[in-house]
Image: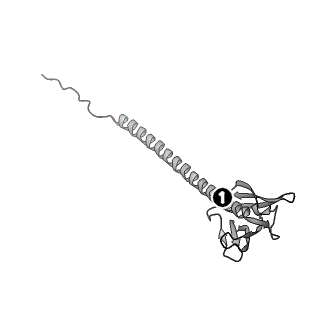
Amino acid sequence: MKQKTKNKNGFTLLEILIYASLLVLLIVLMANAVASLSHLISDAKTERALRSSAEAAMERIAREIRFAETTGAASVFDANPGTLALTSIDPFTEAAQTITISVSSGRVTLQKDANPVEYLTSDNVSVSNLTFRHITNGSTSESVRTELTIDGTNFYTTTVLRRSY
């Protein structure tokens, strides 16, 4: 007489439930990690765009100040929003020109004489502060300190008017 032996090749319902719950937990943890990573990447892209826009604007403002002869009477110093009017020489035509830098609709603008307005910051950021401070070193030179706040981040530069001395 042969005895039947029980075959244990299958899984019990309890084992299947435990494995399934561990798999669901693992999937949830992975999804959470991917969501956190994508949020960090999005924040980094926003920060890079903000810094890129601010640095480009500050570099252009510094370049225009550097090539200017004097600050104009239409300048508004030590106030927000400030306006900087510069008298300068066009490097290509060597004709006198007036450059005005100010804020309009939350963006830094630059206008040369009656030419169209150029936007120095992107439309993805908002300028909350643009202040110019006039600095003179006796009668020999003239400088402008620029303070720019974009989306809560402050940027500063001080530039000497090279043609002022």
Percent x, y of residue 14: 37, 35
Residue 127 visible in the current orientation: no
Q: From the viewer's perspective, is residue 74 above or below residue 149?
A: below
| Residue found at the very far bottom of the displayed protein | 114
Q: Crowding near pointer 1: few (<14 within 10 Å), some, many (20+)?
A: many
- Residue that carries the numbered disc 1 in the rendered image: 54
Q: From the viewer's perspective, is residue 85 above or below residue 52?
A: below
Going 61% across and 57% down the picture, which residue do you hit?
A: 52
Going 74% across and 73% down the picture, which residue do you hit?
A: 96
Residue span colored magenta: 4-12
Q: How many marks?
A: 1
Circle 1 sits in a helix, a strand or a loop, which is it?
Answer: helix
Q: Is residue 20 left or right of residue 165?
A: left
Tell me the quarter of the image containing the C terminus: bottom right
Splitting the image into 4 quarters, where does residue 120 fall? bottom right
The secondary structure that dominates the magenta segment is loop
